[in-house]
Image (cartoon, rainbow, N blue to C red):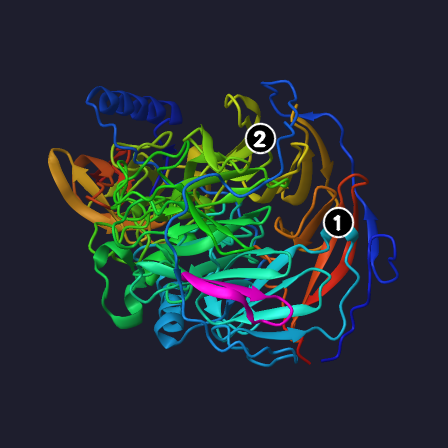
Amino acid sequence: MARVSVAVGLVVASAAVILVGTTVIGLMRAPLLPAGSASAGPAASAPAVTPIPSTAMPQSSEAAATAPGVDTSGGGVSVSQASTIDAIPAPLAGKPWTATAADGTVLMGLLGNPARVRLPEGRNVLGTVGSVVVSAQVAPNGTSSTVSFSSLESGVDVFKPIAVPGQLFVGAVAGTMVYATGFDATSSGDPGLVAISATDGTVVTVIEARPQVEDGGPVVARSVLTSPSGRTIVSALCRPEGCAGGAIIDTSTGKVAGALPEDGGASAISDAYALLRSGGDVTTWVELVALKGGEVAWREDAEEIDGAYVTDAGEVVMLLSRDGAAVVDVVSPNGKARSFKNVPGRAPSLWTVQSSDDLAVLGLDGAFPGNAIGEDGLVTADVLDLKMLQISKGAFSVDLDGQP
Amino acid sequence: MIRRSFRVRASLAAIASLSGALAALLIAAGAAAAHDPIPTHARNFHGNNPVTFHFVSSPGPWYSSEVIAVAETNFRALNSNNSRVPTLSNATGGTGTVIYSSAANSPCNTNPNPAWLQCTSNINQNEYWTIYIRNLSSGGPSGWDWYEKTGSCPSGTSSCWYLKRAMIHELGHAMLGFPDMCLGSQPCRSEDDTVMNETDPHVGLNGSTPFIYRKCDEAGSQLQWNVISYSNEYGDCFDHIEHAGATGLTANVDVTGSTFFQCNGQSVPVSGRLEVWDFDSYGPLGGNPLEGRVVWFNRGATTNYTSATATGVSPTDNWTKSFGGSNVTYTFTAHFDSAPGDGLADSDRPTFTITWSNQC
């Protein structure tokens, strides 16, 4: 593989294009609530709820595979190492990414880390805690999932896979716990939410599965979101057309501490706020609501929002179309907005999973890696400094498979 | 010899008054069914015609052939989307992208939704849209199926959807700028009126087939893009827009002249124009010639004495009819009568007289 990308950060910008955006101070959403502050709760820890039985799966051969590209025994997991990697801006280092290869296998890595894991087709990454990749594969009969704990570096199972009831395929990391949920195909009910320890494989129930939700149609799944601090989780019931409301979970206790309004779906959360959005493909409005009390801090009608997240301080970073152009808005809880309007080239997408409180990562076409995969397996991203509102074009690249 | 006087045309105010009265009657009668065109957001395809699209991660012919069929054939079929929106064509490197995705959460919008089936992103980027179709065989909910994969629903119809229905809906977002209906401020619509309701009907439900745009989709597309064929249909969903007639877009009949004199036994060619009324609320449809539609002429008390068929020319007269007589004066009334489902409403009824005598 002929790599042409070079280490480019926000400061070391030898090949990057720095563009200064337009800062607009004072764009106001309708402020309905004074700016709040996130309460500093205790750090995330294992929920104090009753463990549910989980079944240790038969351990496969534990032959370590340390050489790049060598299959391990961990259920078809293989690993590789990128020969070179770009320097990643410090706030983004360690942010996870996943991509589906043409053969259906799932590639996973961390920004700034050369290690890559290739998971078998059908395996979903629930989260990464340190160098442990927690993934799940739904059993053929759809009643349970096999959860595996693979080393990012070697691909081997760090401990035995476990069987967990239900179809798990999405997760959110809070501390050492991975909160996981998915779908209940057998009863068309609420699949519930479990917390899985990435350190010992313990599984505890956070939200009980219910065989049939009261207002349910035939299709119900659950979403799961985590705050930047990991102290708060939100999990909502979803149907194909969207999610609504959601349970607010304090990860220090593992208990449901409240509920979001039902008239929108949560896009992102902090410990103090949730960004709610209308359902469907086309966003018609967004609003920031306080997790405690549910007061609306601000609301905006917008035709299309292509990605949004909430920082630990409750600022909303969102990419939207305004007057035919892509704009990144940074909106404080009191509704004051700063806008970056000079997004160059084709309107990008905001890669929220890879972004941080300080830096927004912009790519093309939906979530990472979008359509940004070059023939050489490189994904290139732009980075917007949210304080300076300066963009760095081609700020870094990710070599997906680490293969030449 | 023919002497023409002036062009007869009912006043806009009169028509507006009439349509207003009809609307009031409809409201009074409780005709509450929302029968408006699906709203659109403008697109600018930069002169591209057709818009091209390419695949990413196609799982095989069962998928790609169906996507292509919907995009290239159904999307702008004359009997379901007679609009001037660009056609679609599958091509390597095309600007549009159709991705078969195994993403666990919806890759399109900002809500992490693990129950997603299909979605469209980059909706405001004209021809650079991206449609995602969920790979239901890998990593997603067990038991969900696309019908076309096997030609059946292995786990039952309630967790089984038509890929072609998904595509026609998503192309409504990507190409036509339609929002999801039955969501937020958008009212729910009958499945007979639109494919754009937010919930994709599973196999067996009303609305899961056929895989074409419905009448309010077509009307919305036409209101944005105009028609591609003057002689083909208008979406039968215009009866609640401003200045609509009872059954749709009000037609207008013009007659070039109102009083004619001719020698006995000689024919009198009368011409005029049959078109869609040119109200602002009709957008690009206003003034369209109603090609292929019939102008009827009552003669005195004789209804539908004779007729002429309109052509598609613009902006000039598009119908001509010759009349004969001797030692007589006839009063003719020209009119267009809408037919059920044609998206049009009856026209005004201008009159003209022809006198045949030996004083010529």
Rendered residue at 25%/43% (across/down)? A212
| Residue B174 visible, this angle | no
Per the image, label 1 sits on a secondary structure element best described as helix
Rendered residue at 34%/36% (across/down)? B36
x then y, percent, for residue A220: 33, 46
x then y, percent, for residue B193: 28, 44
Residue placed under numbered mark 1 in the picture: A91
Per the image, label 2 sits on a secondary structure element best described as strand
- Find residue B150 and report its image quarter: bottom left
Q: Is residue A152 magenta?
A: yes
B137 relative position to B176: left or right? left
| Residue B43 visible, this angle | yes
Q: Chain of mark 2?
A: A
Q: Quadrant of the N terminus of chain A?
A: bottom right
Q: Main secondary structure of the magenta part?
A: strand
Q: Considering only vertical position in the picture, is A261 above or below B327?
A: above
Q: Residue furthest left?
A: B302
Q: Amino acid at mark 2?
A: Tyr
Q: Which residues are magenta?
A: A146-162
Q: Amino acid at mark 1?
A: Pro
B234 relative position to A181: left or right? left
Looking at the picture, tell me which residue is in the foreground, B353 or A314.
A314
